[in-house]
């Protein structure tokens, strides 16, 4: 079974990153020198996804523009004979087709996903939460698509998290099925620690069926007064089943400035032209 389309919810004020988010969409803030959202788009493209729908707020059109061709820049690079950079730039706009829809009210993640319903239509689709960046050799969403092909239903990525992270995440009640794969017996959004069924928390990668849209249409506000995607997936679970795929790769939540900083340092450490200089500077910082 193929998954051709994906939704990337990217609306919101980016409150934790004010003041920079007064004019720059949060997902366009850089991890080193790449906008955070590019990691999700690349992961989608690597897994064969052809079309991405961004859900944005008004004024955040830069998010979609970024993935369109930049003819003036490209011809300048061509004139200068900078082929490497030119190919890199062309690669950004040729990865996938993108479009966007608006979310005019901030009613929650589930509501954001529902805004893209008409663009997706009646077929299974992926969802990427761009705050979650996963460094792995093969795209995580590809592994989820494999689980979906085998079992159907909804498939979500999960990871082991420490107790203190539980109340701000979605958590599953898992029944092990095989290597890294679980059947989800129940899922709950932002539980109190004492109510959490496990330490396996949802990471922002999903493969969902269009029935989830029906559940979102019916959904009432859940945790923190918002329409929650987790609740809608749990509602269709009884009928269609839900499965989880556990990731053990390096993961960053770039939804906070410190998370973004850590991801940037991690990315720099992986670069030959930066790693040594960064390491020696960090040593002096730690020792001062
Ligand atoms: C969302 C999901 C939650 C998930 C988290 C992962 O929460 O609702 O289930 O664990 O993303 O990043 P949010 O961060 O939007 O509050």
Image (tube, rainbow, N blue to C red):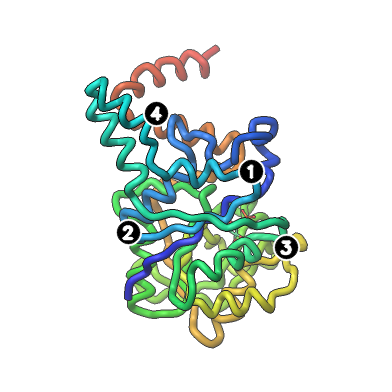
Q: Nearer the viewer, mark 4 or mark 1?
A: 1
Q: Which residue is mark 1?
A: 59
Q: Nearer the viewer, residue 84 or 151?
A: 84
Q: Earlier in the sequence, mark 1 or mark 2?
A: 2
In this orientation, does residue 262 appear?
A: yes
Tell me, for residue 47, which label it has, or none.
Answer: 2
Disc 2, ligand 1: is the CB inside 8 Å? Answer: no
Q: Earlier in the sequence, mark 3 or mark 4?
A: 3
Q: Is residue 102 above or below residue 195?
A: above
Label 3 sits on a secondary structure element that is loop
Q: Nearer the viewer, mark 1 or mark 2?
A: 1
Label 2 sits on a secondary structure element that is loop
In space, the residues marked 3 and 4 are separated at their CA atoms by: 36 Å
Image quarter where ligand 1 lies: bottom right
Q: Nearer the viewer, mark 3 or mark 4?
A: 3
Q: Which residue is mark 3?
A: 226
């Amino acid at each position: 079974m193929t998954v051709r389309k994906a939704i990337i919810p990217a609306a919101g004020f980016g409150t934790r990153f004010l003041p920079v988010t007064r004019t720059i969409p949060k997902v366009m803030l850089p991890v080193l020198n790449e906008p955070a959202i590019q990691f999700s788009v690349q992961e989608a493209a690597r897994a064969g996804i052809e079309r991405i729908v961004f859900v944005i707020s008004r004024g955040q059109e830069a998010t979609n523009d970024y993935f369109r061709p930049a003819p003036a820049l490209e011809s300048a690079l061509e004139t200068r004979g900078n082929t490497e950079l030119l190919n890199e730039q062309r690669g950004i706009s040729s990865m996938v087709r993108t479009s966007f829809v608006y979310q005019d009210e901030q009613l929650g993640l589930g509501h954001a996903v529902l805004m893209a319903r008409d663009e997706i239509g009646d077929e299974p689709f992926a969802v990427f939460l761009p705050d979650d960046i996963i460094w792995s050799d093969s795209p995580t969403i590809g592994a989820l698509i494999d689980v979906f092909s085998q079992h159907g239903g909804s498939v979500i990525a999960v990871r082991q998290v420490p107790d203190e992270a539980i109340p701000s995440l979605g958590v599953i009640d898992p029944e092990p099925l095989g290597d890294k794969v679980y059947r989800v017996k129940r899922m709950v959004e932002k539980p109190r620690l004492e109510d959490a069924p496990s330490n396996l928390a949802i990471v922002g990668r999903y493969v969902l069926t269009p029935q989830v849209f029906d559940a979102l249409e019916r959904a009432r506000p859940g945790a923190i007064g918002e329409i929650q995607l987790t609740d809608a997936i749990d509602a269709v679970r009884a009928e269609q089943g839900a499965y989880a795929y556990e990731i053990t790769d390096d993961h960053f939540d770039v939804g906070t400035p410190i998370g973004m900083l850590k991801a940037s340092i991690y990315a720099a450490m992986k670069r030959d032209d930066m790693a040594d200089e960064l390491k020696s500077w960090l040593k002096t910082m730690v020792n001062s």
